[in-house]
Amino acid sequence: MLCGLYDYVALSLKIQSTVEKNLIDYKENLLAPFSCNPLTHTFTEPSITVGIMDHRQKVAGCFEGYYGVEGIGQFSGNFSAREKNGAIVLSDANGTEITHGLKIRCTAQPDSLFHISEVTIGIDFHWERKEEQVFQGNLILELRKDGMIAVINEINLEDYLKSVISSEMNSRAPREFLKAHAILSRSWLMAALNRKKVPHQPREGATKITEHEIVRWYDREDHDLYDVCADDHCQRYQGITKIISKEAIDAVRQTHGQVITSGETICDARYSKACGGLTENYGTAWDDREVHYLTSISDSSVPHRAIRSEEEAEHWISSRPVVYCNTNDTDFLENVLRDFDRETRDFFRWKIEYAREELEMILQEKSGFDFGTLQNIVPLHRGPSGRISRLKIVGSKKSIIVGKELEIRRWLSRSHLYSSAFVVKVHRDKLGEIDRFVLYGSGWGHGVGLCQIGAAVMASKGFTAGEILNHYFPGTEIQRLY
């Protein structure tokens, strides 16, 4: 462990002593979604819980500075945690037990930080890797019923956002873009917490499974022990490790408490890396309902017509329209994207090619079905950006329809396709047998809401944070909650 490496960070980051009070105030005052006006309520900054890692057999880390550990008092230095006899055992650097329990809470003292080793980022995506990360706030270790450990960070919302903005995008990105992202991310989080507060709120997950069709979408269905996770499944949160400049911190401070609202509702503001020229409707990626501020718009100052047929999809994906996210300016992208994101160069228009046998193996591995000889891949329904929400896979042994957007991307790649906006070309050998499938695609991510690269380009052209958010979330306003 590199305990001590981040002393300079500790001097500038103060851990507020009002975490518990803020959490109580927040739970009492939090907006009930779709029911009350944010302008008529008074809020204090809430604290939240973030799942850093989950379902782990063991955890290794280091307390930099002192942490109050329930039942033993102050503790500092390297630690490890594992399950033993139905409890979490917390041990020091020598392997000596410090304490044990089903839930161990470690409360940060002023200027204290904690390190966690082997944190996985980009889970299941093509940039997946492990890092040591450093966090401020409190550490909670909680044992699941299956004997696995959840590693949870309790932190004030605004401090959480400083990391999110720096984890999602490069801190050297245009200032108005960083401010827009701070408002956007705060809105997404508040909307998520609102929905979680509603009793008996249905969890989003598998929606339709029959012999001939599997339709799934993924949202926040598995976060039972904490408010949000730390990876792309929610919002990237990589601790203070990624806070490398004051620009992201300033963007959060300058937008303190601001959210996007629609009428009496805090907007469930979604975003993805690059829309490909047209953003997507909410229902293409998630449940079948219309969200008026999450409908398809052109990522441009001029309108582009929504895709309505396979012919239009092929024409759109084979073109390179003049839109905000259509940029290959290397210097600009280096200032906008994180280092691991810059490994993805062909995000606007892309191509992936599979030998038939390779794709058959991937499909069996990811779906669990043996399709036999793969005969065709047929889009059945597309959203206005060209993203497919229902796809038919035809094999000699089995044919099945799969959806929605993310499930399609998972089935057709060992990690994930960049998006589900693609057209399929079937290539045959000299005997007329299928030997290759080539996918030509558009965009990076689900495409709903704000296009991160497009928004950064808008900011570089002089658009303000408010103008950027109004472009991607039409009919909304920016309001201050606290």
Image (cartoon, grey):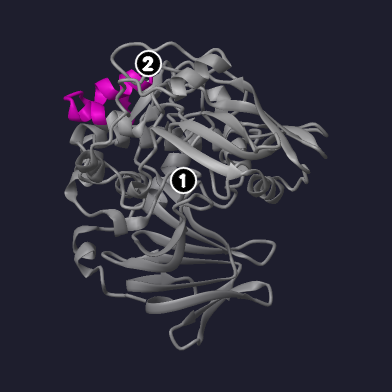
Name the residue: 29% across, 55% down: 242
Q: Is residue 16 visible?
A: no
Q: Picture coordinates of residue 39 (x, y %)?
A: 36, 21
As helix, strand or loop, the secondary structure at mark 1 comes to loop
Of pointers 2 and 1, the one earlier in the residue sequence: 1
Residue drawn at the location 43% of the way across and 32% of the way down: 443
- Determine whether label 2 and label 1 are within 8 Å by CB: no
Please rate how many residues cluster around mark 2, counting C-alpha atoms within 10 Å: few if below 14, some from 14 to 19, many from 20.
Answer: some
In depth, the one of 95 and 126 nearer the eye is 126
Taking the image as drawn, is residue 423 in sight? yes
Res 238 → quadrant:
bottom left
Expressed as whole percent of the image width and height from the top left, the position of residue 126 reads: 48, 51
Q: Residue furthest front?
A: 430
Query: What label sits on residue 474 in the rendered view?
Result: 2
- Relative to 433, say whether 472 is above or below: above
Q: Quadrant of the C terminus?
A: top left
Q: Is residue 121 left or right of residue 287?
A: left
In the rendering, which numbered label is found on residue 71? none
Residue segment shown in magenta: 457-482
Q: Label 1, on which residue?
A: 232
Left or right, 286 with reference to 94: right
Taking the magenta stretch, the answer to whether it contains residue 306 is no
Q: Is residue 452 above or below residue 469?
A: below
Residue 245 placement, left or right of 291: left
> Amino acid under label 2?
Pro
Which residue is at the front of the view, 125 or 413? 413
Q: CA distance from mark 2 to mark 1?
A: 25 Å
Query: Horizontal placement of 219 versus 118: left or right?
Result: right
